[in-house]
Image: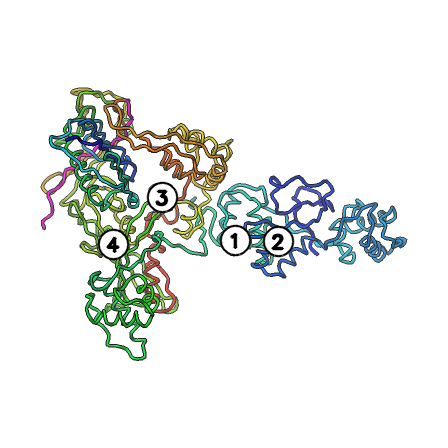
């Protein structure tokens, strides 16, 4: 029998008075004064409490845990108690107090019974208070043996706050048991306790919902990373779901253009179709002659496509999205492909979108295979800089795919090519000195060695890695959101800051919003997440209309917006509700309330992390996956 | 022919300082505010060109800007479009966009309260443009020089120390010589760019301005 484990280290272990559980005390209704000390206190989670845990951890584990938590499910007995359990108590005392006069087993807890209880407690290192609580019952049930000591006191528990909690939240998420995904906010609440409880169940630890030294050690062993390295930079915690650095594809869109007569009839999409039709054809009992893989659609291609569509009960005609889906499934191992990925992203609360067109091919050379990835760009307005293509290769051509067993390496080479037509992306070339973006590159951009490779990444469908919400950051980078600043400015609670920000937003002045946030030291991290959560709980307020101001001799023309209710989503409210000012106050507040990586797709100028600056393996994972599909085996991205 | 009220604006984006500028036509007068990536920043005004006309669209338009891109907006009468750089706009929005940007370029010749960046051999200076005063703060400003070879093929760079000093008021005839001892070897097949970010106050409006001297090199051979 395991004793309860909730006693804080500085508190006497007093039988019958250990009242704990996984329910946040601050939110729990007032309890009755004579609450049974050992009443089971089921875990409350978003997902259905113990039922959910039973599904996850199995009935036996949960049953063991509940038994441990109930400590035998005995009532607490004291003077005046009556009933069969008093009979049980008296019988056990008679059996174990061999030096005392036997009690009459009459089911009445009288003075003699109390005296016998005190004697038993005194000889078994228990508080001799005459009350039979769970520890005394445990000792009686154990045949007089002193029960094992309680587990080590918790290091972190409900009510704990700070960076250590946030680091634990990262690792609990990364452990990935699935009960709930925690915000990395540095606040140990009921939900976190439920996730801890589940982690402990699954890992054979005493389930308490609090993190003691053993649980923390198990968490560290299971999830490496986290904390701050010797270089002072926060170590990433990888999420088991890995990274998906590609932008979210628009619903209802296909990665493939429609191929066939009257549609796309030449180019890399046609070559991909021809290869896949041949692969499928070769699996048939009676194959037709293979079509030429010449990137040009002809009658033989149409005939083989018709056969494929007929065999798969698809309407005959051009190779449309439905037929492509069937063809991709039938022949996932074509050696080349073309993708036209329409996608969107939310950065700084603002939605952006584009269609990225790129092609890839696994080519055989005398020195082995190489994966060639090319984005063709139709530059408009001005000729491109001759340096741009070199910037791309310098930043991107650093990875290979390596097979786990043979250690064979296949280089993944990237190229920026100039061209036109349906396979090409359109980029406007301006002669100014602006900073490149997804649609406009600047010849006079003195940071083009960084910006052009970043924009090239967008041409491959990769999304930005700056000013992201926590979920997007987790998905895109494959890392848990960073702990960052867990404490916030001294003397300002997150709730106060959220309220102050909302109040100042009504003034529509970004400088006033900055004064009560970044001006006080608000930085990205756990505290900022608390601010977001506190803001979401505030009653909505009306932000006054921003009038459309026509240009005149006194003011620039400024677009307006009608009065709006705040949404509870602070970053979006800042984006829509306020205007930029000359000093970038709005941008800086949004930066502090969101997450950015320091990678090439992130914000390397403002974020220092171990991804600092460059392309990362996650950015080229898609092409490693293609190699694996073609070649078979287990491949991973490595540095060359 | 009466010109309907027309407004074009550009805001946000990754360019430093971010775009915050506009052009509008009301009652036959063109008003323009420009501040980012321009040879002159401030307020410009002129009569609408003779014969200037725009076609009124019949539908609104919204296109997400590309990643990192600024937001542009066009309003003609009751219709409006928002989009980003490089967007492939349908007509008549595409034509309107081109027409207004061309007009914006031409309107630089009509300053009313602006500062310009002038660069000549061995010197760079700020000059006041127009008739109305402009307040300028150069305390944190740095002159950045880039020398390109060929068609933006490679570059050498130089930057000054922060200029320092307090706020100044620029009026008619005002000039200010900028630090320019870059020591770079200009010559054939070289093109010099100069950049200066500074804070302005024009007619009471604070503007974060990015002045640029960025002549286009001779185009590369076909």
Report the residue marked by disc 3: A347
**Percent x, y of residue A87:** 83, 54
Report the residue marked by disc 2: A207
Identify the image quadrant of the N terminus of chain B. Answer: top left
The CA span between labels 4 and 3 is 27 Å
**Percent x, y of residue A468:** 39, 45
Count of numbered labels shown in the rendering = 4
Residue B206 highlighted magenta (yes or no): yes
Describe the element under mark 4 as helix, strand or loop. helix
Closer mark to the observer between disc 4 and disc 3: 3
Chain letter behind tag 1? A
Describe the element under mark 2 as helix, strand or loop. loop
Chain letter behind tag 3? A
Report the residue marked by disc 4: A393
* B191 with respect to A406 (left or right): left
Chain letter behind tag 2? A
Tell whether label 4 touches label 2 (CB within 8 Å): no
* A220 with respect to A277 (left or right): right
Instruction: Point out the stretch of residues depicted in magenta.
Output: B204-222
Q: Identify which residue, A123 or B28, lies in the foreground.
A: B28
Chain letter behind tag 4? A
Closer mark to the observer between disc 2 and disc 4: 2
């Amino acid at each position: 029998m395991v004793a309860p484990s909730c006693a804080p280290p500085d508190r006497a272990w007093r039988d019958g008075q250990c009242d704990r559980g996984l329910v946040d005390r601050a939110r729990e209704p007032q309890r009755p004064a004579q609450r049974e000390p050992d009443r089971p206190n089921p875990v409350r989670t978003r997902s259905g409490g113990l039922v959910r845990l039973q599904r996850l951890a199995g009935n036996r584990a949960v049953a063991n845990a509940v038994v441990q938590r109930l400590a035998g499910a005995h009532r607490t007995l004291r003077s005046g108690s009556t009933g069969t359990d008093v009979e049980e108590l008296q019988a056990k005392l008679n059996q174990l107090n061999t030096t005392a006069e036997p009690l009459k087993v009459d089911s009445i807890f009288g003075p003699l019974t109390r005296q016998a209880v005190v004697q038993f407690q005194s000889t078994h290192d228990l508080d001799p208070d005459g009350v039979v609580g769970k520890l005394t019952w445990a000792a009686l049930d154990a045949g007089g043996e002193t029960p094992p000591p309680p587990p080590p006191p918790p290091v972190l528990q409900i009510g704990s706050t700070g960076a250590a909690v946030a680091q634990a939240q990262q690792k609990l998420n990364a452990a990935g048991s699935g009960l709930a995904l925690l915000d990395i906010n540095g606040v140990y609440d009921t939900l976190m306790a439920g996730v801890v409880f589940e982690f402990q169940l699954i890992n054979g630890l005493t389930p308490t919902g609090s993190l003691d030294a053993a649980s923390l050690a198990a968490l560290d062993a299971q999830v490496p990373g986290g904390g701050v390295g010797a270089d002072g930079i926060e170590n990433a915690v990888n999420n088991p779901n890995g990274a998906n650095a590609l932008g979210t594809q628009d619903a209802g869109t296909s990665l493939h253009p429609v191929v066939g007569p009257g549609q796309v009839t030449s180019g890399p999409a046609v070559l991909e179709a021809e290869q896949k039709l041949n692969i499928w054809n070769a699996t048939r009992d009676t194959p037709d002659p293979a079509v030429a893989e010449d990137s040009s659609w002809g009658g033989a291609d149409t005939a083989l496509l018709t056969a494929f569509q007929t065999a798969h009960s698809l309407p005959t005609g051009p190779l449309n999205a439905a037929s492509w889906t069937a063809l991709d499934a039938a022949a996932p191992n074509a050696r080349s492909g073309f993708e036209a990925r329409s996608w969107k992203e939310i950065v700084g609360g603002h939605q952006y979108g584009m269609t990225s067109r790129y092609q890839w091919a696994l080519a055989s050379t005398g020195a082995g295979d190489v994966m060639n990835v090319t984005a063709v760009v139709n530059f408009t307005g001005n000729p491109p800089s001759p340096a741009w293509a070199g910037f791309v290769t310098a930043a991107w051509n650093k990875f290979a795919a390596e097979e786990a067993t043979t250690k064979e390496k296949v280089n993944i080479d990237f190229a920026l090519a100039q061209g036109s037509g349906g396979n090409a992306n359109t980029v406007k070339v301006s002669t100014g000195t602006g900073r490149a973006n997804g649609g406009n590159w600047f010849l006079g951009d003195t940071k083009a060695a960084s910006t052009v490779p970043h924009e090239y990444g967008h041409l491959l469908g990769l999304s930005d890695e700056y000013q992201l919400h926590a979920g997007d950051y987790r998905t895109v980078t494959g890392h848990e959101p960073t702990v960052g600043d867990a404490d916030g400015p001294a003397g300002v609670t997150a709730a106060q800051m959220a309220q102050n920000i909302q109040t100042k937003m009504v003034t529509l002045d970004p400088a006033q919003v900055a004064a009560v946030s970044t001006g006080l030291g608000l930085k990205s991290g756990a505290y900022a997440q608390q601010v977001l959560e506190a803001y979401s709980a505030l009653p909505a307020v009306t932000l006054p209309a921003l009038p459309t101001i026509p240009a005149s001799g006194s003011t620039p023309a400024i677009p307006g917006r009608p009065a709006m209710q705040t949404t509870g989503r602070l970053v979006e409210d800042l984006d829509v509700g306020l205007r930029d000012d000359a000093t970038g106050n709005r941008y800086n507040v949004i930066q502090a309330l969101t997450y950015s990586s320091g990678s090439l797709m992130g914000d390397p100028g403002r974020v220092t992390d171990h991804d600092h600056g460059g392309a990362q393996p996650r950015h080229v994972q898609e092409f490693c996956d293609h190699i694996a599909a073609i070649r078979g085996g287990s491949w991973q991205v490595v540095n060359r | 022919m009466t010109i309907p009220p027309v407004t074009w604006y550009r805001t946000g984006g990754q360019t430093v300082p971010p775009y915050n500028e506009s052009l509008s036509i009301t009652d036959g007068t063109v008003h323009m505010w420009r501040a980012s990536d321009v040879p002159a920043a401030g307020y410009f005004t002129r009569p609408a060109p003779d014969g200037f006309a725009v076609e009124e669209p019949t539908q609104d338009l919204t296109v997400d800007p590309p990643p990192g891109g600024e937001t542009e907006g066009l309003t003609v009468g009751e219709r409006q479009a928002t989009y980003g750089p490089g967007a492939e706009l349908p007509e008549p929005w595409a034509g309107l966009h081109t027409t207004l940007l061309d007009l914006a370029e031409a309107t630089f010749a009509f300053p009313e309260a602006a500062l310009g960046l002038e660069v000549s051999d061995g010197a760079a200076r700020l000059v006041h443009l127009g008739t109305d005063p402009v307040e300028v703060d150069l305390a944190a400003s740095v002159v950045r020089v880039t020398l390109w070879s060929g068609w933006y093929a490679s570059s050498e760079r130089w930057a000054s120390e922060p200029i320092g000093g307090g706020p100044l008021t620029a009026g008619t005839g005002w000039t200010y010589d900028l630090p320019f001892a870059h020591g770079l070897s200009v010559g054939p097949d070289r093109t010099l760019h100069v950049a200066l970010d500074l804070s302005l106050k024009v007619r009471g409006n604070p503007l974060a301005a990015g002045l640029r001297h960025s002549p286009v090199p001779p185009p590369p051979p076909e």
